Image (spheres, rainbow, N blue to C red):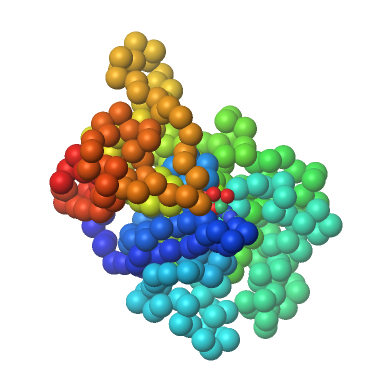
């Protein structure tokens, strides 16, 4: 990355949910920067806190600790109604499930126009109609789709509507929360390529969430690997795939299907066991119960995330 201007700074972000009398730690002291116009991939098994992290950054969940800075401004300290509205316009989300995230009673045009009416109140109906047609074309559909209802479209087309809806308000930053996970494998690449094209054309910044390392490879500049609410490794994509340092990252990479079945099979160390409960976190490293390289110290103290090579961060006692 040459342009290293920080758009979003996440600093010791924490989100705990109340579950009965206990606390569930979904996001636990997470820190990273997102640079302007990059894609930061956020990867980890289901339940590790990716969605909560993305939503808390956007202010859709109230954080219970830490800070999120958008262009240097603490998001939770934005108080004027106009400024809150402006942040909501700049920072959008694309949801995982293109079936449940679109209101079946609304036409595609109304779904896309909703945000335009909120954020561009002066726009006339004819202008909005033209803008919706333009957005439909931008996402690879055509103006005629505007009159249809979500259930008349395929999964891939619906996700294109989800993308058009996010783009409609002219955002700078989009949390893409598993936007291809619910889609047919055959159309996943099309949607990823569309997101890449739009990013280039519009100068967008993405946080791209996925439970599968192979899905973020193509689109990401850097990748953060999450386990039980914590970032355990963060580096540029080449380093994550080429020299993963954390045993968890290594395990995730080893289960990616390899096109050549003879290649690297002997090095495969798939994960064993289940993720521990985020309600009763273990003392020490959270990954200890599943780690093939667990040492005594891992049961005693939490390894901090530290930079072991320029731009390559890992939280593991093997690198103390
Ligand atoms: N609204 C909520 N209330 C209580 N617990 C929640 C809530 N949302 C998520 N969680 C819990 O937080 C943890 C992280 O969930 P989530 O962020 O959805 O993970 P991911 O997106 O990585 O699958 C999970 O244990 C989940 O059950
Ligand atoms: Mg999720």
Residue at the spot x=56%, y=46% of the render?
Answer: 179
Q: Nearer the viewer, residue 251 or 15?
A: 15
Evaluate whether residue 115 shows in this view. Answer: yes
Q: Quadrant of the N terminus?
A: bottom left
| 203 on left or right of 243 | right
Locate residue 64, reporting x and y percent: 47, 69
Locate residue 160, reporting x and y percent: 63, 49
| 245 on left or right of 34 | left
Does 50 appear above or below 270? Answer: below
Does 261 appear above or below 282? Answer: above
Total tally of numbered discs in the picture: 0
The residue furthest top is: 262
Locate residue 24, reporting x and y percent: 52, 56
Q: Nearer the viewer, residue 179 or 22?
A: 22
Does 102 appear above or below 123? Answer: above
Residue at the spot x=27%, y=47% of the render?
Answer: 300
Splitting the image into 4 quarters, where does residue 205 fall?
bottom left
Residue at the spot x=34%, y=61% of the render?
Answer: 31
The residue furthest right is: 105
């Amino acid at each position: 990355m040459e342009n290293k201007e920080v758009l979003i700074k996440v600093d010791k972000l924490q989100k705990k949910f109340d579950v009965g009398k206990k606390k569930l730690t979904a996001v636990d002291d997470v820190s990273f920067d997102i640079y302007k116009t990059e894609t930061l991939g956020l990867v980890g098994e289901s339940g590790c806190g990716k969605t909560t992290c993305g939503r808390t950054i956007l202010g859709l969940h109230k954080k219970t600790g830490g800070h999120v800075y958008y262009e240097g401004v603490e998001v939770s300290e934005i108080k004027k109604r106009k400024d809150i509205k402006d942040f909501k316009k700049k920072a959008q989300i694309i949801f995982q499930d293109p079936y449940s995230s679109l209101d079946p009673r609304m036409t595609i045009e109304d779904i896309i126009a909703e945000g335009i009416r909120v954020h561009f109140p002066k726009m006339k109906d004819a202008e909005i109609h033209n803008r919706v047609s333009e957005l439909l074309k931008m996402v690879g559909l055509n103006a005629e789709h505007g009159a249809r209802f979500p259930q008349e479209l395929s999964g891939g087309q619906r996700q294109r509507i989800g993308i058009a809806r996010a783009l409609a308000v002219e955002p700078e930053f989009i949390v893409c929360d598993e936007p291809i996970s619910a889609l047919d494998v055959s159309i996943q690449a099309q949607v990823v390529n569309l997101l890449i094209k739009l990013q280039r054309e519009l100068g967008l910044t993405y946080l791209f969430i996925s439970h599968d390392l192979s899905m973020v490879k193509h689109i990401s500049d850097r990748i953060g690997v999450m386990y039980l609410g914590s970032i355990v490794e963060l580096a540029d994509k080449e380093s994550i795939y080429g020299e993963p340092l954390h045993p968890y990252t290594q395990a995730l990479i080893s289960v990616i299907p390899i096109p050549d079945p003879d290649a690297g099979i002997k090095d495969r160390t798939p994960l064993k066991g289940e993720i521990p409960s985020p309600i009763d976190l273990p003392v020490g490293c959270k990954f200890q119960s599943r780690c093939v390289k667990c040492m005594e110290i891992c049961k005693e103290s939490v390894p901090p995330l530290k930079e072991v090579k320029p731009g390559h961060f890992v939280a593991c006692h093997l690198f103390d």
